Image: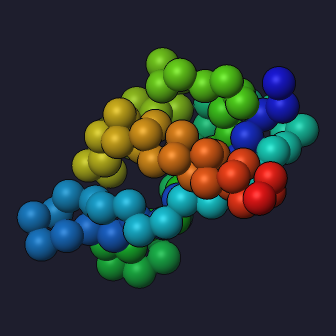
């Protein structure tokens, strides 16, 4: 299965925890190397980019790297799955 590139926008709330604002994804031939690119675009506003296998299950190390940004790895994984499902339904509908 092809790898999937994700771009996530997140914003810190009043408690300092991040909330996911949007998730975009697209198939890619780029290599899944476990890298998480994180860019603070404004104070408390983050943009994340990473690549995972198309059959990711949440055990990939890149998801664990979100904890330092106060995002639950399980929440990020779920958001990515939902984005993939939405993307697939849009391309088939």
Left or right: residue 31 compared with residue 16: right
| Residue 49 % position (x, y) | 61, 53
- Between 84 and 70, the residue placed more toward the observer is 84
Q: Residue at x 67, y 24 (%)?
A: 55
Q: Residue at x 89, y 38 (%)?
A: 29
Rendered position, 20 above or below 50? below
Q: Residue at x 52, y 32 (%)?
A: 62
Residue at the limit of the structure toward the right, as seen here: 29
Q: Is residue 12 visible?
A: yes
Residue at the limit of the structure toward the bottom, as seen here: 42
Left or right: residue 76 compared with residue 37: left
Left or right: residue 21 compared with residue 87: left
| Residue 38 % position (x, y) | 52, 56
| Residue 73 % position (x, y) | 36, 35
Quadrant housing the C terminus: bottom right
Left or right: residue 35 compared with residue 88: left
Quadrant in the rendering for residue 18: bottom left
């Amino acid at each position: 299965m092809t790898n999937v590139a994700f771009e996530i926008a997140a914003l810190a709330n009043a408690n300092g925890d991040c909330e996911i604002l949007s998730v975009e994804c697209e198939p890619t031939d780029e290599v899944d190397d476990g890298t998480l690119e994180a860019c603070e675009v404004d104070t408390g506003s983050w943009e994340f980019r990473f690549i995972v296998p198309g059959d990711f299950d949440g055990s990939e190390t890149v998801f664990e790297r979100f904890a330092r940004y106060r995002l639950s790895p399980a929440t990020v994984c779920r958001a990515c799955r939902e984005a993939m499902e939405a993307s697939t339904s849009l391309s088939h509908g």
